[in-house]
Amino acid sequence: MPERPRLIAALLTALVVFTAAPAAPADAARGVAVPDFYTPPSSLPAADGALIRSEPLPLALSLPGLHGPLPGRATRIMYKSTDNNGQPVAVTGAYVEPAAAWKGPGTRPLVVLAPGTMGQGDQCSTSLALQKGLVIGIGGSRSTVSVGYEVLALYRLLAKGIAVVQTDYVGLGTPGRLHTYVDRVDEGHAVLDAARAARALTGRTSDVGLYGYSQGGGATAAAAELQASYAPDVALRATYSGAPPANLLDTTTAIDGTELAGAIGWAVNGFVQSSPELEPLLAKYLSDAGRAALTDLSTMCVGDAIFAYAGKKTSSWTTTGRSMTDILRSEPVAKAFIDAQLIGTTKPTGVVRVATGVNDNLVPHAQARTMAAAWCGLGGDVVYVPINVLKTPSPLLNHFGPLLSDQGTAVDWLSARLSGTAVTSNCAGLPQLA
């Protein structure tokens, strides 16, 4: 490993930033002071990807360099997007211009980094995590833990001279609406509009790659499908989609009762916000305990949810003892909404590397592989990679093991595609792959 990435990795392991602020009783940020920057203006520009505002973003992990900070100079951004109801929405994120030179041909490329699961509270946004590192907030009985774990992938991309823009997604960080967790259209639009916002910020037109794992893998997969219809001006060349939750019914079934059971609450909260016609189902099925859990989870980050809801079953949230997934499957209105979230129905733009752990039983391997096969059937340019990591008793470890073991390879693969190196699809051999 070159010395600069080695030093960054060493510092990363030691990074802990503590923040605390008094919280009002209804403070959704759980004791963390969220800057005023994140509050959207009353009116938004018309164009998707238009830059609403920007400001310098101090990185928690940064080193001085001869020509500027290492690994780069960061800018916090707010940009306009369109949600799944066709309504304008403000989304925040961060753009980082790398200190390292781009050694490939042409203009420095851009990668949109779509984060994995961060939570649903405003304090959980990835741009805030870049500034704070590990965020710990204390506000009376309401505390929070948010970890900026995507920073290693971001810094690996920056070390190659690739500019990176990271989206916070719709509703994550911006008060007034909930984060629409794993919503296919909201996430895909936020990813594509982040590329447009980076172009508006820098004035530079670049080839674009997408990088994401888990929630981020679903977001980049959705963006690759939506690019042709929503953002044909974004020069999308290649996408990395790691462990994508392409089929939400399969994924929620697998998550229920695991360390990440709270994520089901985030999904349901977002579904109801996007489609108020689902509210009568909550009135019909949710118990008082279920309502309290959904309210509680709406302000939590992923660390909070693991501490509070690991091992919980959603059957304990309902008046009938049925799981939330059973209800989503059986109720026609809910089933129609969930079916519309399926990824794998439209040919993606550019080449896509789909990587999934064969032992991943949190975001199931089979449904991600099915998405890749479906894209192949539509004529997509797909490189499917099964990741073999030792299976453990923990679904969470089975899910995050491939993230760590494959990350360097995924970054190298994406960099090679943005350098113009061709790759051969392995769709023809997909039925034989593990």
Image (cartoon, rainbow, N blue to C red):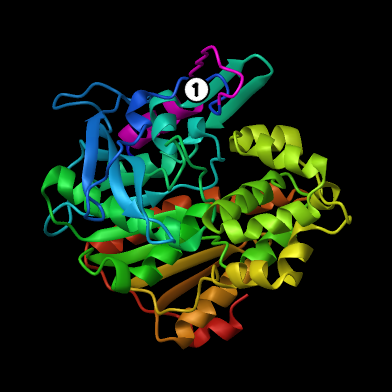
**Rendered location of residue 157, percent (x, y):** 32, 46
Amino acid carrying label 1: it is Ala
Could you tell whether 194 is left or right of 15 in the image? left
Say which of 60 and 336 sits in front: 336
Could you tell whether 331 is left or right of 114 in the image? right
Q: Quadrant of residue 254?
A: bottom right
Which residues are drawn in magenta?
Answer: 4-27
Badge 1 is on which residue? 14
Which residue corresponds to the image point at 50% horizontal and 37% vertical from the top-left?
A: 149
**Residue 24 among those drawn in magenta:** yes
Q: Quadrant of the N terminus?
A: top left
**Residue 362 in sight in this render:** no
**Rendered location of residue 399, percent (x, y):** 63, 53
Could you tell whether 251 is left or right of 210 in the image? right
Say which of 221 and 355 sits in front: 221
Q: Is residue 298 above or below residue 363?
A: above
Which residue corresponds to the image point at 13% horizontal and 27% vertical from the top-left?
A: 67
Q: Is residue 16 above or below residue 322?
A: above
Q: Is residue 144 above or below residue 157?
A: above
Instruction: Estimate how packed mark 1 is, as few (under 14), some (14 to 19) or many (20 or more) residues with alpha carbons within 10 Å.
Output: few
